[in-house]
Amino acid sequence: MNLLIDENIPGAREAFARFGSVRLMAGRAIDAAAVRDADALLVRSITRVDRALLAGSRVRFVATATAGTDHVRIDELDALGIRFAHAPGSNADSVVDYVLGVLALAYPAPRGLAGRTVGIVGCGQVGARLLVRLRALGVACRVYDPLLTRDIPPESCALQETLACDVLSLHVPLTREGAHATRHMIGARELARLRDDALLINAARGPVVDNAALLEAMRRRGALRAALDVWEHEPQPDRALLARVLIGTPHIAGYAHDGKLRGARQVYAALRAFLGAGASPADPPELRPAPAGVLRAGDCGSWQQAVLACYDPRGDDARLRAAMLDEDEGARAAAFDRLRRDYPLRREFSAWRIGTAAAPGTPVHAALLAAGFAP
């Protein structure tokens, strides 16, 4: 069996070699010629998977090691008789960690988010987990998700109410059709409704926000802030917009090592079930994360301090800004992808133990637990 796998899926060569011959490729380089002789294709979010890619190939199984599926034409795979799998929730905690990192920077202790409200747009895997953590931290929240039919949180409200919050954090899939299409759901009209000093966080998909409208809004309203992990026209983000945002990162919010391994484990399990490969291990050691360690007492004066000790988004921001200085568009695009491919090891907060860094029963210990750290 021939498997073509995105090189950014960790442990892929060792774990998936149990099923056959493994070929690793950069996600953007995967094309029809590359997949022609493959029996299975495993990708991440930057590879467009559709009939044009797969028609005439031997592929009978496709999986994306990501939660989102907007890069896959599932209907076209169905028509070709190709089995599809994805990894729902795999990187949700990683994205929540990213958002908390941004909030820790934007609203440092001691005041933090006291007296402020966070609006969450989209209450799926990521939005729901963000809501749980912010609630535990005592942060007031409002939630907009018109597609929820059960487990509707009491914080639910209309979009206009979330737009009035101090922070607006976006966690929706990219959809282009239907009554609740999300492409440009945050456009000039919605941006005009934001508070003058609001913070907009987009760790969903770039086109959810009209980037041109956001740039114009930030030019006119100097106090408006934004943290963007995703961009229209990736891998070439608008450099003028990057120059104005508080934090700009190269689509890595979900790139914590734990989340990437979790996604790999989910697609491994799906392929194993598809093949009926009972002889292969259900939980391959290559896809198991090791413990990260214990927090230092000096890093635990507040939840913000602990969060930034484990993940400070300013590092990713600085690397992206440096990469985008090149005047050559092709070089900038390659640099954007290289930052993702060579992403430094980052662990989810849940991989870090509080240990003796904060005494149980103290407000700091409770806040660290609320932020997602292990006891």
Image: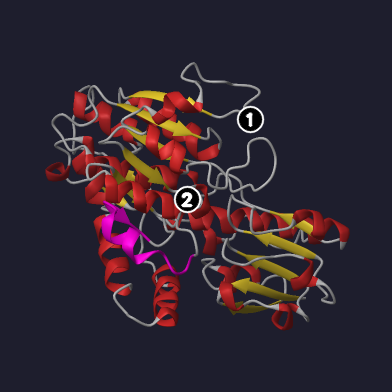
Q: Is residue 268 shown left or right of residue 189?
A: right
Asked if one can make out residue 342 in the rendered structure from this viewpoint, the answer is yes
For the N terminus, the quadrant is: bottom right
Would you place residue 283 above or below residue 225 in this image? Answer: below
Q: In the image, which disc is placed on residue 147?
A: 1
Is 244 one of the magenta-colored residues? yes
Q: Position of residue 52 (x, y in %)?
A: 77, 71
- Label 2 Cα neighbours within 10 Å, binned few <14 / some 14-19 / many ≥20: some
Q: Is residue 14 shown left or right of residue 191?
A: right
Q: Which residues are magenta?
A: 234-249
Which residue shows up at 42% across the image and 79% down it? 329
Would you place residue 187 above or below residue 290 in this image? Answer: above
Comes first in the chain, label 2 or label 1: 1
Q: Secondary structure at mark 1?
A: loop
Residue 62: image quadrant is bottom right
Q: CA distance from mark 2 to mark 1?
A: 22 Å
Q: Between residue 108 and residue 159, name the one nearer to us.
A: 159
Q: Specify the amino acid type for callout 1.
A: Leu
Q: Specify the amino acid type for callout 2.
A: Asp
Foreground mark, 2 or 1, reads 2
Q: Position of residue 187 (x, y in %)?
A: 47, 44
Q: Between residue 342 and residue 202, name the one nearer to us.
A: 202
Q: In the image, which disc is placed on residue 210?
A: 2
Q: Is residue 164 shown left or right of residue 205?
A: left
Q: Position of residue 246 (x, y in %)?
A: 26, 51
Is 78 one of the magenta-colored residues? no
Q: Position of residue 71 (x, y in %)?
A: 64, 59
Q: Between residue 221 and residue 255, name the one nearer to us.
A: 221
